[in-house]
Amino acid sequence: MKNVSLAFLFVIFLVPASAMAQNATQIDAVRNGAKSCVKCNLFQAELSYLNLPNRNFSGARLRQADLSLSTMNHSRFSHANLSVANLFGARFTRANFNAANLRRASMVGTYLGYADFTGADLHGACLSGANLTGAVIKQSQLDTACGDASTILPAGLTIPVCQ
């Protein structure tokens, strides 16, 4: 119990609040068309319905961000944290998710055609109704995610059904 209390105090008092909160200036820049936001803090950013192709979000923190129904074709998310993000119905044609954290991300109905998932973490991600035609992805990655009968996968790959 003492270790838990000390860890809590460390987080509260020693980790700067700015390290945990989103950066409104960076979010506004993205919403206004910035082409690059490398290592930006876009935690819980509202980016739904936006047309943002060819952007560079490498290393960005997009945890719990809402990218639903956005278009981000040819964008780079390598080493980005998209855990618990909402990508519902978005378009990510030929996007780069190399080594991205997509744990528990909702990618229901998302178009991910020809996207590159090399080294991406998909543990707990929901890909129901997603289209991964031509995507670079391994069976071992899909084994940690889930989908449904309407999930479109590259030839020879399967995905567990979401419970």
Image (cartoon, rainbow, N blue to C red):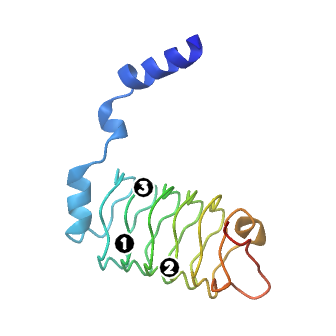
State the residue in front, 61 or 59.
61
Residue at disc 1, secondary structure: loop
Q: Position of residue 18 (x, y in %)?
A: 30, 36
Q: Please say if 118 is above or below 49.
A: above
Q: Please say if 139 is above or below 3.
A: below
Amino acid on which the number 1 mark rests in the picture: Arg
Q: Which residue is mark 2?
A: 110
Q: Please say if 74 is above or below 37.
A: below
Q: Which is nearer the N-term, disc 2 or disc 1? A: 1
Q: Which is nearer the N-term, disc 2 or disc 3? A: 3
Q: CA distance from mark 2 to mark 3?
A: 16 Å
Quarter of the view holding residue 97: bottom right
Q: What residue is shown at x 50% (from left), y 79% (from top)?
A: 110
Q: CA distance from mark 2 to mark 1?
A: 18 Å
Q: What residue is shown at x 39% (from left), y 67% (from top)?
A: 56
Q: Which is nearer the N-term, disc 3 or disc 1? A: 1
Residue at disc 2, secondary structure: loop
86 relative position to 115: left or right: left
Instruction: Give the quarter of the figure containing the C terminus.
Output: bottom right
Q: What residue is shown at x 56% (from left), y 78% (from top)?
A: 115
Q: Which mark is residue 55?
A: 1
